[in-house]
Image (tube, rainbow, N blue to C red):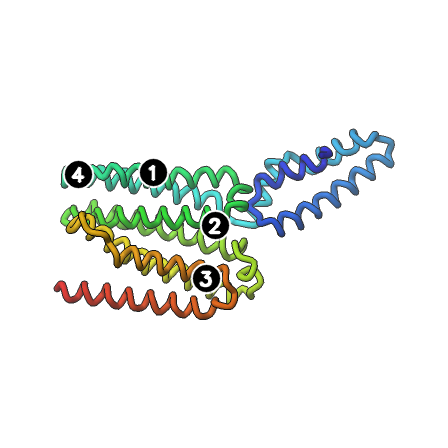
């Protein structure tokens, strides 16, 4: 690999791009660097010296890559960092509050939540890895939200302490909003699916909003149900919550992977979310 190629790869290590966009930018960088190299060779420099001078003119690879990444994804790095920090803070404060007010330590939840939030920092520092593992990053952000939602349910034990409760609730909302904004931004501008990438911005935006909103409703209610099973009937199998999760993920994959079933799966996702929300609201009102 030539020094020019090494330099370009070093630049792209700091940029969150899918393979197609990465290839386009690599070709553009290669063209300009080769042109500069030819100019310096014509001035009498050796090929090696010409390449080194051309690379020096472009600047430090890490700085160029970070600047390019900021242009493509404005505020991506700081927002992901805030998401990780707010998640760590939220989990620590919820654990401390449940111990103070209920003498309970949700240790397993705390460990899993910390792992998921800390894992976000890995992708913050490795933009190229985030691009190569786009679906993994989106799944991580979604799982992190679900862990956060479980923490929100734990807060029910000290709801009478309004200052603590509403302070943590505000932190949870900020954390969740950033997570979903980054899921949306990543999927909108660097789609994980070829068919999704071929859609117009309007249709892609519609598809993503449907995925996100139905996911929040179905997975949120399913997690709420799982917590109920764990608390009240820990020996039984939570068939309904697990079935809801399986159904939504199946429709989600169909929506992404099977072009012929795209419209049907989208309709079924909306129908499932509507039924789940209606059933949840009915149970809540019936309880009063």
Number of residues whose C-alpha sits closer than 10 Å to that of mark 3, classed few (under 14), some (14–19) or many (20 or more): some
Q: Looking at the image, do the residues carrying marks 2 and 3 touch, with CB atoms under 8 Å apart?
A: no
Residue in the foreground of this view, choosing between 148 and 251: 251
Choose top left, top right, bottom left or bottom right for residue 47.
Answer: top right
Q: CA distance from mark 1 to mark 2?
A: 20 Å
Q: Earlier in the sequence, mark 2 or mark 3?
A: 2
* Helix, strand or loop status at disc 4: loop
Number of residues whose C-alpha sits closer than 10 Å to that of mark 1, classed few (under 14), some (14–19) or many (20 or more): many
Q: CA distance from mark 4 to mark 2?
A: 35 Å
Q: Earlier in the sequence, mark 1 or mark 2?
A: 1
Residue occupying the point 57% across, 40% down: 14
> Which residue is the site of mark 1?
114
Q: Earlier in the sequence, mark 1 or mark 4?
A: 4
Which mark is nearer the camera, 2 or 3?
3
Q: Can I make out residue 162 in this image?
A: no
Which mark is nearer the camera, 4 or 2?
2
Residue in the foreground of this view, choosing between 48 and 150: 150
> Which residue is the site of mark 2?
135
Quarter of the image for the N terminus: give it.
Answer: top right
């Amino acid at each position: 690999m030539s020094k020019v190629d090494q330099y370009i790869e070093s630049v792209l290590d700091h940029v969150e791009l899918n393979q197609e966009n990465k290839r386009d930018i690599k070709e553009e960088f290669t063209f300009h660097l080769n042109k500069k190299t030819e100019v310096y060779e014509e001035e009498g420099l050796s090929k090696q010296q010409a390449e080194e001078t051309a690379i020096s003119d472009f600047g430090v690879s890490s700085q160029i890559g970070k600047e390019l990444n900021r242009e493509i994804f404005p505020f991506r790095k700081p927002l992901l960092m805030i998401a990780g920090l707010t998640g760590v803070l939220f989990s620590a404060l919820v654990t401390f509050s449940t111990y103070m007010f209920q003498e309970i330590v949700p240790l397993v939840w705390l460990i899993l939540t910390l792992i998921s939030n800390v894992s976000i920092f890995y992708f913050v520092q490795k933009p190229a890895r985030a691009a190569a593992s786009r679906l993994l990053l989106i799944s991580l952000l979604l799982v992190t939200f679900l862990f956060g939602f479980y923490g929100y349910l734990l807060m029910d034990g000290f709801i009478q302490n309004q200052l603590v409760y509403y302070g943590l609730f505000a932190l949870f909302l900020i954390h969740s909003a950033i997570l979903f904004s980054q899921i949306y931004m990543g999927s909108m501008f660097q789609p994980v699916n070829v068919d999704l990438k071929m859609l117009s911005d309007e249709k892609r935006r519609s598809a993503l909003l449907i995925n996100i909103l139905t996911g929040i409703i179905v997975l949120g209610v399913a997690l709420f149900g799982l917590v109920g099973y764990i608390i009240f009937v820990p020996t039984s199998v939570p068939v309904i919550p697990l079935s809801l999760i399986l159904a939504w993920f199946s429709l989600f994959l169909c929506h992404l992977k099977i072009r012929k079933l795209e419209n049907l799966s989208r309709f079924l996702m909306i129908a499932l979310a509507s039924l789940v929300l209606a059933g949840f609201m009915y149970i809540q009102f019936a309880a009063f």
